[in-house]
Image (tube, grey):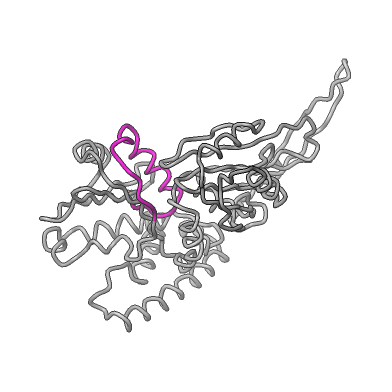
Amino acid sequence: TAYSLTGEEQQFYYNEYCFFLEKDGSGRWLISDLEKVKREAVSFNSELSPFSKQVFCSVYEIISLDELVNILNNLESIREIEELPCGVHMRVTYYEDNFNHGVSFFTGIIADLVINGDEFVVIAREHAVLREFHELLTNTGDLPVISRGEYKVNLLTAYSYMEGQYVNFEDVLLDKENEDVSEDGVLRLVTARYLIKDVHQVRQRIESLKTIEVEIPGEYRVYYRLDEKSAEPGFFVEYIMGPNWVTLSTFGDQDMAVARKEFEDGIYECLEFDGMEIREGGLFNVLTSQVKKYYPDLESTLKEVYLNKWYYSRLATLQGMSPCEACQTEEGTRLLWTMFKKIREKEKKKYFRKGKSTINSINLREYMRILERKKEEKH
């Protein structure tokens, strides 16, 4: 028997197989009659999920970049993975001939090394690897780096940093502390900020990507791009462009990585990455009284594309299921009602703290209404 973990369309699956081993005429072993006997979805929080694994990180401040690069160049089996906005992501690997232990997500990886501006980070699954790198970096005459601490984070958080989505590692930790923002099932809006060196080229790039455009007189322009792969028009990315700056906002790091790559393509030299943040006001904080006056249909449009995005998004609070999937099972329905209870509690706190007239968001009835509407459409 054997098993595998596969990733398909933002979902992990556990697969079990049964097969026979046979010897051919020359004495070689062959696999025959391979049959898949089990397949089930794996939530991101499951022990089977590779992204639930924890990794260790050492964070350093770079004192001498030249000296650091000289040390890294002497490492065997180091290679560049990708360039980052302010640095480079490298990986140190080894290769084993014996695969009796199985091939995993970490097979062959000793450590990931990230130079990010004035920061150098070593990321490894084994803490002993961090100690070895620390000795390597500090056993020199003039220290190229100064230690800023060690941390333990999950693999998904580490990969967000490796992809250059944060200006420094501290932002990763702040983001991690705010993970409960989405605990009630409300999608979390992540924003990337850029300074613009060539306004004309950046505007042309956004114009080629946008689906909807909203011009705020005398202030800035807002563009929205919808998810073309979705079964229904759902939100993908919001661009807000000012006189010398631009922001990209998506729901979650995965969409952000795709949106940034497509946006930066061809205009990388026209931009200067300025950091990431979680936007507390969410998607609807652009809906000022002035905007509503000029664009009376914008609020209903944003709510529709948000709810379509939410309906098909896999949520940790639903154990990795989307609301679309959850409402089809008894256990999923129970999780949905627990989530709705949290949304209701949050609504009450907002109501008493800010007053009903200041709330720009999706209310509980709208979440419930889309579930009922989708259910009726299926029947």
> Seen in the image, is 331 located left or right of residue 249?
right
- Whole-percent x and y of residue 364? 37, 71
- Whole-percent x and y of residue 19? 78, 35
Q: Is residue 138 above or below residue 377?
A: above
Outermost residue, bottom side = 352
- In reply to whether residue 270 is colored magenta, the answer given is yes
Is residue 105 visible in the rendered image? The answer is no
Residues shaded magenta: 249-276
* Residue in the picture at 38% in, 46% down: 231
* Residue in the picture at 30% in, 35% down: 267
Outermost residue, top side = 26
Is residue 257 visible in the rendered image? The answer is yes
- Whole-percent x and y of residue 194? 31, 47
- Viewer-side residue, 278 vs 368: 278
Numbered disc total? 0
**Quadrant that contains the N terminus:** top right
* Residue in the picture at 44% in, 66% down: 181
> Seen in the image, is 330 located left or right of residue 108?
left
- Viewer-side residue, 33 vs 15: 15
Where residue 276 sits, quadrant-wise, is bottom left
**Quadrant that contains the C terminus:** bottom left
> Seen in the image, is 226 located left or right of residue 296?
right
Q: Is residue 108 above or below residue 194?
A: above
- Whole-percent x and y of residue 25? 88, 16
- In reply to whether residue 232 is colored magenta, the answer given is no
- Viewer-side residue, 302 vs 135: 135
Q: Is residue 106 above or below residue 343?
A: above
